[in-house]
Image: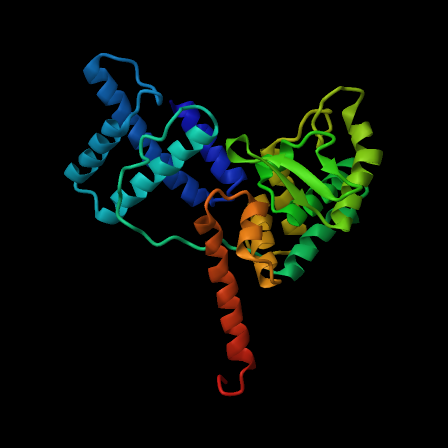
């Protein structure tokens, strides 16, 4: 059971870009749930498993939290951690249904995504071009493609050779639930991927027949962790004084598209969000930007 939790924590670190403190909080909360689940299984004389964790188990866990005197905010945090974990397990195909789906919890404020400015994106994307190594040339194509499409990093590293049409300018990827979508990309991103595919990938492949588009120096598919580490290095080289992850570019893509006049439905489709409410969080960011511009520009607001 702990192996599944570790996989989830890796996902939070690499794809979501969560801080070390946040990940440790998730680790503690989920470890407590593991201990509870193992205890319940021991009472029944059965082996603990996530497949056997059902809605009733979750309700019993919440009841125990209340009985132990946890504050409502702490209970809400632990329930939220469980919900996120089981959503991940369903998306990964580890379990068939989410046992927390219809389980309520106290409402807590949801933090806004943290995009970076267009100038910061430009500084980040310029870093690989300062080096001539095969990896740097690969990373340039990956960063350009990620910001051009708004893909999740898991979707990016899962691309196979041929999934990017550099002539017509689009990428085919498979999102959550293996749902396919086609995303248009601009000419610069297409040209960067075309150069990588033509000049770099054959050298990285080392004669291996791996179908992956983006390869590591061993000729194998580059992992989320490997690319996340590269992004951190480029952010440091660009002197960006904030935490940058691959997911930051997804947030920035959505925010910049909406700020540039794209409609919400189009951005929803580009991001692969099942519900438009997930995309609407970005409208709050653009609204705040408009407010700052108004306060700065209107003669009566000064």
Q: Residue at x 63, y 34 (%)?
A: 157
Q: Residue furthest right?
A: 199
- Residue 257 at x, y percent in the picture: 61, 57
Kindly tell me whether residue 77 is visible in this rendering.
Answer: yes
Q: Is residue 106 above or below residue 89?
A: below
- Residue 227 at x, y percent in the picture: 63, 37
- Residue 36 at x, y percent in the picture: 25, 27
- Residue 203 at x, y percent in the picture: 82, 28
Q: Residue furthest left?
A: 67
Quarter residue 9 falls in:
top left
Q: Residue furthest top?
A: 45
Quarter residue 153 falls in:
top right
Depth check, front residue: 240 or 145 = 145
Q: Residue at x 72, y 22 (%)?
A: 210
Kindly tell me whether residue 243 is visible in this rendering.
Answer: no
Depth check, front residue: 222 or 101 = 101
Q: Residue at x 47, y 55 (%)?
A: 280
Q: Colour scheme in the image?
A: rainbow
Q: Residue at x 26, y 48 (%)?
A: 106
Q: Is residue 101 above or below residue 144?
A: above
Quarter residue 47 falls in:
top left
How many numbered badges does the structure rendering display?
0
Depth check, front residue: 153 or 103 = 103
């Amino acid at each position: 059971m702990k192996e599944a939790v570790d996989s989830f924590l890796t996902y939070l670190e690499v794809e979501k870009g969560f801080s070390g403190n946040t990940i440790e909080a998730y680790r503690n909360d989920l470890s407590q749930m593991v201990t509870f689940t193992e205890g319940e299984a021991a009472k029944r004389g059965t082996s603990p498993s996530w497949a056997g964790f059902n809605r009733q188990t979750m309700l019993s866990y919440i009841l125990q939290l209340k009985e132990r005197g946890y504050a409502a905010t702490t209970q809400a945090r632990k329930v939220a951690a469980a919900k996120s974990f089981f959503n991940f397990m369903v998306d990964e195909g580890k379990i068939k249904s989410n046992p927390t789906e219809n389980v309520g919890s106290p409402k807590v404020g949801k933090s806004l995504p943290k995009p970076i400015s267009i100038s910061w994106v430009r500084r980040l994307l310029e870093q690989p071009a300062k080096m001539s190594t095969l990896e740097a040339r690969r990373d340039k194509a990956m960063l350009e493609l990620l910001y051009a499409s708004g893909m999740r990093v898991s979707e990016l590293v899962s691309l196979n050779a041929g999934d990017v049409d550099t002539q017509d300018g689009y990428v085919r990827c498979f999102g959550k639930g293996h749902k396919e979508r086609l995303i248009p990309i601009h000419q610069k991103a297409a040209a960067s991927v075309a150069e990588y595919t033509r000049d770099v990938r054959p050298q990285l492949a080392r004669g291996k027949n791996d179908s992956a588009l983006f390869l590591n120096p061993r000729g194998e598919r580059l992992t989320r962790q490997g690319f996340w580490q590269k992004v951190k290095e480029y952010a440091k080289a660009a002197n960006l004084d904030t935490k940058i992850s691959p997911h930051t570019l997804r947030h920035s893509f959505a925010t910049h598209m909406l700020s540039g006049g794209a409609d919400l439905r189009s951005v929803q489709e580009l991001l692969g969000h099942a519900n438009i409410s997930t995309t609407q969080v970005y409208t709050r960011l653009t609204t705040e930007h408009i407010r700052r511009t108004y306060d700065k520009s209107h003669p009566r607001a000064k």
